[in-house]
Image (cartoon, rainbow, N blue to C red):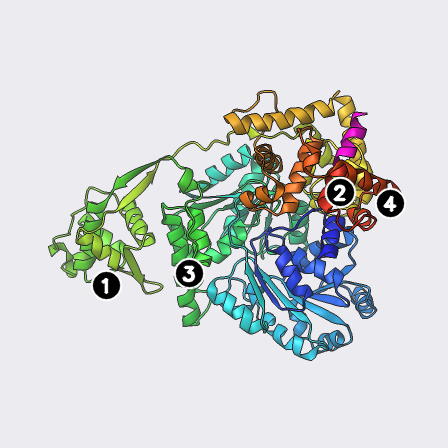
């Protein structure tokens, strides 16, 4: 694992692993199969890429989409990890060259489409290659219960049987219900696997359901308020996709579209325009997205309700993969239910599949109608044991609401369903409650019921919304598929017997506002660095985020790195990227600092002080720049660790309190020291050991810790080395 951590820093630019990554990597390196369920943006690919570099032979990665393979291979090659892919996009000559490279051990990772496993010639080729691991990406595709079922995934189980040395199999997915998880284990053929589920929560995502019959107006206004941000707008059909994209482009927005009705060339061009930041908005059907590794998508809007929760969470999860605050908004209208029912009804003749699709659609409708925490609903869908409190970061939790007792109204609705024999759907129930004089109601003698016309003062939409709410909260059950009927649940009977009250939170429509929040990074410099990043990416014919993520650029605009030592401390900057691009970015930062007459040391101290002030008072320093992108989380989390240090806690105690690794806490305190915070270095390294460390540093040279550690007595720890070097560098700067 020491070597794995070195590779993490060298190639990826991170000091410590995210939650679950260490355990997965340790299990793979020990020769054990793995099933990892980790949220989108949780770093799944790193979990098999680092072991692939440490293991002999080649790792075969089963990947479902060409775009996913290309992005992954481009990224790996950029940071110096030899990789390739085999899929239908290769010419015969390219295929032959790639096969030759694989046979001669030129790659550490080889990405292949699952359909390749159906080819006997390809499986025969694999027998000639030393394969030490099979990594299965998007593993939910193996299950018919999953939302992206790919029959070719079923061939993976056979693959291990025909290969020599029985390679390790690791399977990764972001969305898996208990049924799908069972299929992954059995159908891929995992043996005595290590299982980890780091949870389905994406704390940086804000979820919201907006009930609207004026969706186009909403989208145009939202796009205007978020100009320059990258976003995806998902639509249910090609026709709607065309309409929304045309409205956006006519209004002057840089929008492109993606659906199966376009030619391959058009789809590829539009996708590249979005990935390369030539277009801000992608309007698409669900044909777009799986495997798109664009990190800085700030919002995902669903123009229509998807047909199941799995699809929705997967698509919404494409926002904020850089862990920056992002929004996931679902625009809902009753027509969405009608459209989805039509699509399901015409998608297959298999009654079992249809029944399953209708049931999953009902779960999606319930999400749109609940007034409870949206995040809790979504996570509980995948993890029935999830029992955390409300998130206070979703549309329902944050809305100004009025809690209203609708027990009497509920009793009237339930009583009507009961008297109608629990054999009819919501429209017929509403007809009776409203006192409809239609022939059908009279022919069924429903005009003689005591509940006939009992709620005639309510409009149909209000009654429909009440019934939908009662369904989502479990007072009413639905039976049947295409023509569902309503019946009363046990909790519904409890309400009828006056044993339970029902409250609904009425959400008042309010003007959406995006309040400015503190951003200590320099927005002017951020735009300069974005322009430089785009030029470099364009020259290399790569998407900009492969050069550096937005989060890395913001860190540069906070720290102002003016030499290579400082540049290597930027989050997401490893040795390879620093060597390739570091001098260009440092030159740009130096020029910006000079042109704007910036006192770097002073502004770093000011940023640190401002964060401390906000933490203490909640007020924003008027001297700082404002931004709509959200608070810089890295600065804020360092400040929390520093506050605990000032209270007298040591690294282990801070680590325990915050639930972070000691390495992460050490990094926080080192960063604070560099920013000018008061740190007593003797808390971490004695004067005698500091001298030994600096002597070794002078002899060894460079900034890598491991060679310095190896040149020192074994009792001297990495912690002591870090703080000794930190103090030394600070002294040298002050001199």
Q: Disc 3 or 2, which lies upstream in sequence?
A: 3
The image shows residue 263 at horizontal and vertical percentages of 64, 56
Residue under label 3: 360
Q: CA distance from mark 1 to mark 4?
A: 82 Å
Confirm or deny contact between disc 2 and disc 1 (CB under 8 A). no
Task: Give the CA distance from mark 3 to mark 4.
Answer: 61 Å
Q: CA distance from mark 2 to mark 1?
A: 75 Å
Q: Nearer the viewer, mark 2 or mark 1?
A: 2
Task: Name the front one of labels 1 and 4.
Answer: 4
- Chain-order first, disc 3 or disc 4: 3
Q: Does residue 585 appear to the left or right of 651 in the view shown?
A: right
Q: Is residue 728 magenta?
A: yes
Q: Which residues are magenta?
A: 725-735
In the image shown, does 401 or 414 lie closer to the viewer? 401
Considering the image in quadrants, where does the C terminus appear?
A: top right
**Circle 1/circle 4 CB separation < 8 Å:** no
| Residue behind mark 2 | 721
Give the residue at mark 4: 700
- Looking at the rendered image, the quarter that the N terminus falls into is bottom right
Give the SS element for disc 2. helix
Q: Is residue 439 something one can see in this rendering?
A: no
Determine which residue is flagged by label 1. Answer: 423
N-terminal-most mark, 3 or 1:
3
């Amino acid at each position: 694992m020491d070597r794995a951590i070195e590779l993490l820093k060298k190639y990826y630019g991170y000091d410590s692993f995210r939650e679950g990554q260490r355990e997965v990597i340790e299990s793979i390196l020990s020769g054990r199969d793995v099933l990892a369920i980790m949220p989108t943006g949780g770093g799944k690919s790193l979990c098999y890429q680092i072991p692939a570099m440490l293991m002999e032979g080649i790792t075969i990665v089963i990947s479902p989409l060409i775009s996913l393979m290309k992005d992954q291979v481009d990224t790996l090659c950029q940071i110096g990890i030899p990789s390739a892919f085999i899929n239908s996009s290769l010419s015969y000559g390219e295929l032959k060259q790639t096969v030759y490279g694989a046979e001669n051990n030129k790659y550490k990772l080889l990405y292949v489409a699952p359909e390749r496993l159906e080819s006997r010639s390809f499986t025969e080729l694999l027998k000639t290659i030393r394969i030490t691991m099979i990594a299965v990406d998007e593993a939910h595709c193996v299950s018919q219960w999953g939302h992206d079922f790919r029959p070719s995934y079923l061939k993976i189980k056979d693959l291990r049987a025909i290969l020599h040395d029985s390679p390790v199999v690791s399977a990764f997915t972001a969305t898996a219900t208990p049924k799908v998880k069972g299929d992954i284990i059995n159908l891929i053929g995992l043996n005595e696997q290590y299982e980890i589920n780091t949870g389905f929560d994406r704390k940086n995502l804000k979820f919201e359901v907006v009930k609207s019959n004026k969706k186009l107006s909403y989208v145009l206004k939202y796009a205007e308020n978020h100009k320059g941000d990258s976003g995806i707008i998902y639509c249910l059909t090609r026709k709607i996709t065309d309409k929304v994209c045309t409205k956006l482009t006519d209004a002057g927005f840089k929008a492109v579209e993606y659906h199966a009705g376009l030619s391959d060339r058009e789809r590829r061009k539009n996708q590249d325009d979005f990935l390369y930041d030539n277009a801000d908005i992608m309007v698409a059907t669900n044909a777009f997205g799986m495997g798109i590794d664009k990190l800085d998508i700030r919002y995902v809007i669903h123009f229509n309700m998807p047909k199941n929760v799995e699809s929705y969470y997967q698509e919404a999860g494409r926002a904020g993969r850089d862990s920056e605050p992002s929004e996931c908004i679902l625009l809902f209208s009753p027509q969405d239910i009608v459209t989805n029912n039509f699509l399901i009804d015409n998608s297959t003749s298999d009654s079992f599949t249809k029944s399953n699709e209708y049931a999953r659609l009902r779960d999606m409708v319930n999400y749109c109608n609940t007034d409870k925490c949206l995040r809790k609903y979504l996570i509980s869908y995948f993890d029935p044991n999830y029992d955390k409190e409300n998130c206070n970061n979703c549309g329902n939790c944050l809305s100004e609401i009025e809690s209203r007792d609708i027990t009497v109204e509920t009793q009237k609705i339930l009583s009507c369903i009961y008297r109608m024999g629990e054999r009819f759907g919501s429209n017929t129930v509403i007809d009776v409650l409203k006192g409809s004089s239609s022939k059908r109601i009279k022919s069924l003698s429903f005009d003689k019921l005591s509940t006939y016309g009992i709620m005639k003062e309510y409009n149909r939409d209000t009654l429909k919304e009440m019934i939908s709410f009662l369904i989502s909260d479990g007072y009413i059950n639905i039976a049947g598929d295409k023509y569902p009927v309503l019946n009363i649940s046990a909790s519904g009977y409890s309400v009828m017997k006056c044993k339970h009250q029902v409250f609904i939170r009425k959400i008042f429509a309010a003007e959406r506002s995006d309040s400015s929040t503190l951003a200590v990074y320099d927005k002017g410099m951020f735009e300069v660095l974005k322009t430089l990043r785009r030029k470099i990416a364009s020259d290399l014919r790569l998407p900009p985020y492969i050069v550096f993520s937005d989060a890395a650029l913001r860190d540069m605009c906070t720290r102002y790195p003016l030499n290579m030592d400082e540049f290597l401390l930027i989050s997401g900057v490893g040795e390879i990227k620093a060597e390739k691009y570091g001098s260009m970015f440092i030159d740009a930062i130096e020029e910006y600092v000079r042109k704007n007459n910036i006192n770097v040391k002073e502004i770093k101290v000011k940023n640190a002080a401002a964060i401390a002030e906000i933490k203490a008072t909640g007020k924003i320093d008027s001297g700082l720049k404002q931004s709509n992108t959200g608070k810089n989380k890295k600065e804020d989390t360092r400040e929390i660790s520093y506050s605990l240090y000032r209270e007298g806690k040591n690294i282990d105690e801070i680590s325990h309190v915050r639930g972070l690794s000691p390495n992460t806490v050490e990094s926080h305190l080192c960063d604070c020291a560099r920013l000018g915070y008061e740190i007593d270095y003797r808390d971490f390294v004695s004067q005698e050991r500091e001298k030994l460390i600096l002597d070794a540093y002078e002899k060894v040279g460079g900034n890598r810790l491991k060679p310095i550690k190896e040149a020192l007595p074994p009792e001297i720890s990495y912690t002591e080395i870090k703080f000794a070097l930190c103090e030394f560098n600070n002294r040298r700067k002050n001199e």
